[in-house]
Amino acid sequence: MKTELWYLALVTAFTGLLWFPYVLDRTKVWGLTDTVGYPANPKPLDAWAERLKRAHANAVENLVIFAPLVLVANAMGITGGAIATAAMVYFWARVVHAVAYTAAWPWVRTLAFTAGWLSCVVIAWQILTR
């Protein structure tokens, strides 16, 4: 498997699992019945869980950019060090972003987001300059 496809699979799996911790917090705060239902006046979640929920939404939004770029590059036969490195950096940037967002480290969160965005720029550049 190409490195960039491996990291696409990893980032997709990671994004797909990010909801789990904040739903556990929701269950702790709201109880199981309200968690699976539609409470009229839900109690606020713990602050870290609210931040993780926003980090998860951001991860989903950015996966919509990253995944097609990797797949288009793959379909075009564009591979190599730049694409593979960008995919690896993107994955680790998203992990750091989620941790930093949850821990309320805004500068680290912003730097991680920027690293992930620049990774997408590198892949797009590789595609658009062919």
Image (spheres, grey):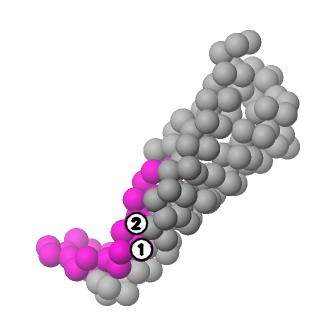
Q: Secondary structure at mark 1?
A: helix
Return the residue found at the far front. Answer: 107
- Which residue corresponds to mark 2? 51
From the viewer's perspective, is residue 81 above or below residue 51? Answer: above
Bin the neighbour count of mark 2 within 10 Å (Cα to Cα): few under 14, some 14-19, many 20 and up. many
From the viewer's perspective, is residue 68 above or below residue 17? Answer: above
Q: Secondary structure at mark 2?
A: helix
Q: Residue 48's mark?
A: 1
Residue 81 found in image quarter: top right
Closest to the observer: 70 or 92? 92
Which quarter of the rendering shows the N terminus?
A: top right
Measuring 49% from the left and 75% from the top, which residue is drawn there?
21
Measuring 74% from the left and 12% from the top, which residue is drawn there?
130
Q: Position of residue 27 (x, y in %)?
A: 37, 83
Measuring 25% from the left and 76% from the top, which residue is drawn there?
44
Q: Is residue 13 visible?
A: yes
Q: CA distance from mark 2 to mark 1?
A: 5 Å
Q: Amino acid at mark 2?
A: Arg
What residue span does the magenta drawing correspond to?
34-60
Residue 54 found in image quarter: bottom left
- Position of 42 compared to 54: left or right? left
Q: Amino acid at mark 1?
A: Trp
Q: Position of residue 109 (x, y in %)?
A: 51, 56
From the viewer's perspective, is residue 76 above or below residue 63? Answer: above
Q: Position of residue 28 (x, y in %)?
A: 37, 87
Return the residue found at the far top. Answer: 130
Most common secondary structure along the magenta stretch? helix
State yes or no: residue 41 in magenta: yes
State yes or no: residue 51 in magenta: yes
